[in-house]
Image (spheres, grey):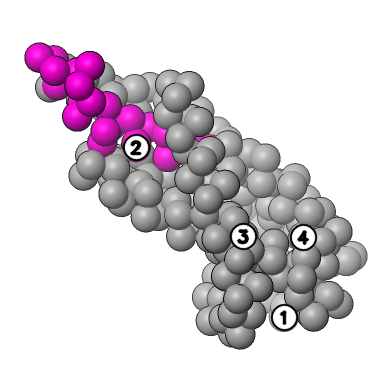
Amino acid sequence: MRPWLLTAGVVFAFGFSIGIILYIAAPELIVDFKDALKELAEKVSKDGKIQLSWQSVHFVFWQNFTAALIASFGGAIFGLPTIFISFVNFVLLGFLAGLAIFGSEAGQLNLFRFLVLIIPHGIFEIAAILFSVALGLKLGISWLLPKSKGQRTETFWLSLKQIFVMMPLVVILLFVAATIEIFVTGSISRWL
C-alpha cells in the first residue's frame, strides 16, 4: 500500500501546487471558486455563520464520503475518476492557499487564518482522501502492471477487497474530520 500512498501524495502535491500557480496566474478565478464555495457554505450556515449542529456534520461527512467513494471505486476505470476527483479537490485547496499567501483580500483569508481553519480537520480529511486515492489508484493500475501478468484478475479482486477492508478507517477519519470541521473550525471561524 505504501507505493500507492506515495503516488497519492504526489497527486496531492501536484494538484496543490497547480492550485497555487493558478491563483498567481489568474486570481480573477476566485469569483468562480467563491460561487461554488458559497453554495456549499449555505448548506451548513445561517446568517453567514456555520451552524454548529449534527445536521451540518452529516452534510459535510456525506460530501466528503461521496468524494472518497468515487476516488476509491472509480479507480476501477483505470484510475481515471480517482485522479480527476482528487486533482480537482487538491487544486481547489491549493488555490485557496494561494489566495491566503498572495491574495490582496488578506482581511478575508490570510495564511494564519487559512492554516487555523484547515489544519484541525484537514489532518483527518486529507488522510482519508489520500487513503481513498491510493486505494483507487491501486485498484485501477496494479492489475495492469507487468508483475501482475498471469494473475491480473486475482490482483484486481484483491485490490477491490482491500477497499472494503480499509473503508471503515476512511469513514472514521471523515466522520472525525466533519465533526471537527463543524464544531471546532466552525467555532474558531466565528472568532477570526
Instruction: State the residue position of label 1.
Output: 47
Residue visible at 66% across and 46% down in the picture? 122
Q: Indicate which label's residue lies in the foreground, 4 or 3.
A: 3
Q: Quadrant of residue 42?
A: bottom right
Mark 4 falls on what kind of element? helix
Name of the residue lying farthest toward the right: 191
Residues at circles 2 and 3 in contact by the CB criterion of under 8 Å: no
- Could you tell whether 145 is left or right of 99 in the image? left
Residue visible at 63% across and 39% down in the picture? 124
Which kind of residue does numbered mark 2 sit on?
A: Gly
Residues at circles 4 and 2 in contact by the CB criterion of under 8 Å: no
Main SS type for the magenta part? helix
The 10 Å Cα crowd at callout 3, few under 14, some 14 to 19, many 20 or more, is many
Residue visible at 37% across and 49% down in the picture? 83
Instruction: State the residue position of label 2.
Output: 136
Spatial CA distance of label 1 from label 3 is 27 Å
Which kind of residue does numbered mark 1 sit on?
A: Asp
Q: Indicate which label's residue lies in the foreground, 1 or 2.
A: 2
Q: Indicate which label's residue lies in the foreground, 1 or 3.
A: 3
- Could you tell whether 125 is left or right of 112 in the image? left
Mark toward the start of the polypeptide (4 vs 3): 3
Which kind of residue does numbered mark 3 sit on?
A: Gly
Q: Residue 143: x percent and y percent?
A: 21, 26
Residues at circles 4 and 1 in contact by the CB criterion of under 8 Å: no
Q: Quadrant of residue 145?
A: top left
Q: Residue 50: x percent and y percent?
A: 71, 67
In the drawing, what numbered circle is on residue 94? 3
Mark 2 falls on what kind of element? helix
